[in-house]
Structure formats: C-alpha cells, structure tokens
Amino acid sequence: MNAKHLATLEFPKVLARLAAYASFSAGEERIRALTPATDLREVRWRLETTSEARTLLDTKPGTTLGGARDVRPMAQAAQRGAVLLPPELLDVRDTLIAARNLHRTLTRLKGQFPHLAGLAAGIQPCPEIVDAIDRCLDERGNIRDDASPELARIRREARIAHDRIQDKLQSIIQSPRNAEVLQEPIITRREGRYVIPLKTDFKGRLRGVVHDMSASGATIFIEPLSVVELNNTWRELQLEEQQEVNRILAQLAARIAERAAEIEQTVEALAELDLVFAKARYADAIRGTAPELVPLREHGTSGNQHPGST
C-alpha cells in the first residue's frame, strides 16, 4: 500500500492519535513509523499482543514505562568517549529501572501474556550500571561525597579550609577597630574568593588584595592578606574536587559505553512495548473490538463463499 492510498485512508491521522498515547519519545517514533501488515500471521500477532496489553492494563493498571527515556544518543555519545552529565546519567538509570520493573512483571506473567513476555525478553536491565550511578549520584544529580575515597578527602579538607576563612573574616568584621572602615560588616565573594567591603576612603587602613569596586566607587572589595593563603588553599581544593568529579563522571560514562549495545536494545524493546500499550489504550478509548480474521480463499474454490471472508 503506497503513501497516497494511506493518506486517502487518513492513516497518518490515526497514527497521530495513537502517538498521543505513547509514554516516551522512542515509543512515539515507533508508532509514527508503523505501517499496515499484510501477512495474516503478523496481523494476528499484532491483534493478540494488543489484546494481551489491554488485559494487562485492565488487571494491573500500575504497569507503566514510567521513567523511561530514549537514552540511545547518550549511550552512543559515551561510546565516542563523551563524559555524560549527571542529569543524563540519571536518565540512563531511570530508564534501566523502568525496564527492569517491566521485565520482572512480564516474565512473571509469561503464561498469561506470552507475546508481551516475548517482547520483554529483549530487555537487558544492566543492574551494575544502575548500582554504579546510585552509588555516585543522589536524586538531584549531585556527586555523593563517598563516590570515591579521594573525593571524600578533598571535600573534607575543603570544608575545613572554608570554615577557617569564615572564622578569620568574621573576626575582622566584628573587630571594633575596623567598624569605621567597613562599608558593611558582611562577607561576600568576588572572582571566587571571599572578600569584605571596605570604604574607598580607608583603602590603606586594611592591607589586602582589591578584587572589585562598586559602581559608585564608594566601596572596594578587599581580600585581607591574612586570608590570602587560606583562600588559595580553598580554591586549590575546589579545583581538585572538580577534577575528581570529572574523573568519576568519565568512569560512569565508560561503564555505559561498555554496555551501549544492551542499552540500545533495551530502549528498542521498551519502544515496542510502548507501541503495544499505546494501541491498547487507544483501543479502550475508542471502545474498539478485535476483528476475527480468516484466510483469504482462492477465487472460485467454493461456490458458497461468504462475502465477508475475502
């Protein structure tokens, strides 16, 4: 059947309606690429699979692909050596968890839903990747302190250095002898370093490094000499932390690269299941009924051929 005939039958409009029931982009992509089947066995398989899905969703409405994303581009990027960002890693994890849950459900119900279980057989849950991401990232995508012993050490030392800076600057701004030279008794940051606001007229009263000036010119932001070394230490630890975080992210991406083929296979299996579930939900929405199919008889083989059998 060519595209002109399909357009006449408004098949693209049907697919557009069906796509609205997809749970994620890979399933929608599969739906929009759908074409009518002409092989009787294939048509029957599709109808039976849709019927299974309708029964499953009716008896177990909590069965979903919740959390699934099309993470194939991320797996491919990891194969090329790219470092994946935390939100991307969480998408990979959530997709694998959704796949694992669906795989468990359909495998357990294989006797009742053999076609769906057959589709779920293509899922590769990759539990070691889920565990690795969970061990290194929290739910917001922040790298956990215990993602590596080195990161734990760096962050511990950085907190100590930060507290020392704060203590030192607090003693400076709270000292009565500095009250008249300060624009405000506050601690702020300029160029990634902690500074205090000093009245320009008293610039020479407190020795330090000037990092900025207010628009009016009445205030300069100075880093007292007594905290320069502390700030240096803190900044160095921040750079070390970022390097270690990058190393951890690269390590996670490398794990995903190793299982890229399985992850892509899992997304494709989820997309096929999403297509089936979408057809089931659409069938329910329009109160559809599965037709009864019979083989096409050769013309003239029976003089009493029923018109509906062709």
Image: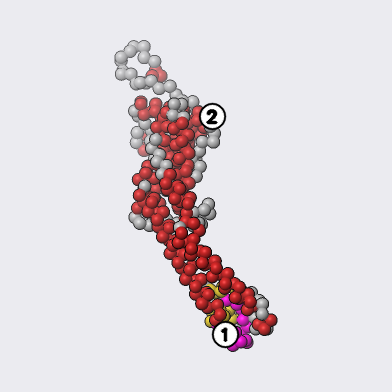
Extreme-top residue of the structure: 304
The three-letter code of the residue at mark 2 reads Thr
| Colour scheme of the rendered structure | secondary structure
Viewer-proximal residue among 33 and 97: 97
Residues drawn in magenta: 195-208
Residue 45 quadrant: top left
Q: Is residue 134 above or below residue 57?
A: below
Residue 107 quadrant: top left
Q: Which secondary structure lies at badge 1?
A: loop
Viewer-proximal residue among 300 and 97: 97
Q: How crowded is mark 2: few (under 14 residues within 10 Å), some or many (20 or more)?
A: few
Q: Position of residue 100 (x, y in %)?
A: 45, 40
* Quadrant of the image containing the C terminus: top left
* Residue under pointer 1: 207
Disc number placed over residue 44 in the picture, else none? none
* Quadrant of the image containing the N terminus: top left
The three-letter code of the residue at mark 1 reads Arg
Which residue appears at 39% of the width and 32% of the height?
A: 118
Any part of residue 19 in sight: no
Q: Distance between the residues labelled 2 and 1?
A: 76 Å
